[in-house]
Image (cartoon, grey):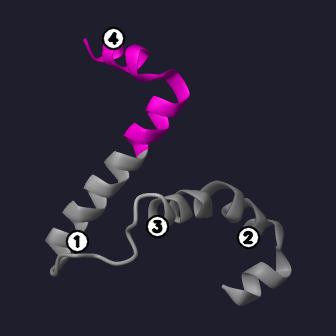
Amino acid sequence: MAERVRTNPQIMRRRKALIEHCFGTIKRSLGYHYFLCRGLSKVKTELSLTVLAYNLKRAINLVGVGALISALH
């Protein structure tokens, strides 16, 4: 990875712009610093619920509660 970043540094800049923001928001705003469950299937479920909460929060911020509820009906 270090070699790839050295030869092509815009890869890391793009990753920071697209991906790292999501993980930082999940850790800081939602308070997830570590997994509460043990076992791969339970951790996958916990991560899925965390990402669902993040996505719902983003949708509410982007379109609002009323538009989101009307889109679900």
Image location (x, y in percent) of residue 16: 69, 64
The amino acid type found where label 4 is placed reads: Ser
Going from N to C along the chain, the mark reached first, 4 or 2, is 2
**Magenta span:** 55-73
N-terminal of the pair, mark 1 or mark 2, is 2
Q: Quadrant of the C terminus?
A: top left
Q: Quadrant of the N terminus?
A: bottom right
Q: Which residue is mark 4?
A: 70
Q: Inspect the image, locate mark 2, and give the three-letter code of the amino acid beneath it.
A: Met
Disc 2, SS = helix
Given this view, does label 4 or label 1 mark the residue nearer the observer? 4
Residue at mark 2: 12
Q: Which residue is mark 1?
A: 43
Amino acid under disc 3: Lys
Q: For numbered disc 4, what is the local secondary structure?
A: helix
As drawn, which residue projects farthest toward the bottom? 2
- First in residue order: circle 4 vs circle 1: 1
Q: Nearer the viewer, mark 2 or mark 3?
A: 3
Marks 1 and 3, the one that precedes in the sequence = 3
User: How packed is label 3: few (under 14 Cα within 10 Å), some, or many (20 or more)?
Assistant: some
Give the residue at x 64% y 55%: 18
Closer mark to the observer between disc 1 and disc 3: 3
Q: Nearer the viewer, residue 67 or 1?
A: 67
Point out the tag, 2 or 3, that comes first from the N-terminus: 2
